[in-house]
Image (cartoon, helix red, strand yellow):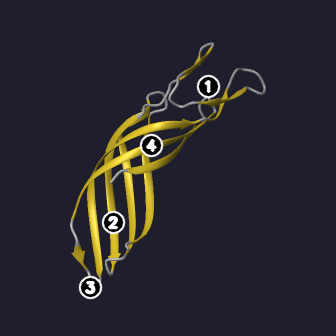
Amino acid sequence: MAHLHFHHFFKLNQKTFPSVNSREVSVQIPVKFGYDFTLGEKLHFIPSVGAYGRFSMVSIKENVTENTGENSGNSFKWNSFNSYQHNTNRLDGYKRWDVGGLIEGKFVYANRYAVTLDYSRGFLDKSPQFKFKNHSYHLTLGYTL
């Protein structure tokens, strides 16, 4: 099952770029292995672990503040996949591809209702400049017809 994700990344307290904001729309495809534990007549717990591949399709332009040495600085909208250069200030574009690991816990009641909590963490640096990785938490409530 592929997942569509909206991500919000930010990095603060950099001297050259004190505020960098970005949002992306991405597709994540997980491969998980788990086991179904029966906790009662109608209750099941399914823990699983696995890996994922993610591709960021669209960057939603967000504000960036650049320290130009002037009082107000420079604020502009930035597509996070494109690099930016102004004089000696450089902002590297983010990588579109990522792979990572994930862990999930799912409770299913009466084969109809489900509550899932998962965490995923990227293995690759999203930005070589800021050295951060993708990570996300999801809480999902489900009902099967």
Question: Which label is found at residue 40?
Answer: 3
- Please tell me which of labels 3 and 1 falls first in the chain: 1
Residue under label 2, please give it: 105
From mark 4 to mark 1, how far is it between C-alphas?
28 Å
From mark 2 to mark 3, how far is it between C-alphas?
17 Å
Q: Nearer the viewer, mark 4 or mark 3?
A: 4
Q: Position of residue 50 (x, y in %)?
A: 26, 52
**Type of amino acid at the residue the image marks with label 4:** Ser
**Type of amino acid at the residue the image marks with label 1:** Thr
Residue 90 in which image quadrant: top right
Q: Position of residue 133 (x, y in %)?
A: 42, 40
Q: Nearer the viewer, mark 1 or mark 2?
A: 2
Q: Position of residue 26 (x, y in %)?
A: 44, 43
Relative to 138, 44 lies left or right: left
Quadrant where the image shows the C terminus = bottom left
Residue at the image position 28 percent from the left and 65 percent from the top: 47
- Please tell me which of labels 2 and 4 falls first in the chain: 4
Residue lying at the far right of the rendered structure: 71
Query: Relative to residue 40, is residue 104 depicted above or below?
Result: above
Residue at the image position 68 percent from the left and 25 percent from the top: 67
Quadrant where the image shows the N terminus = bottom left
Residue under label 1, please give it: 16
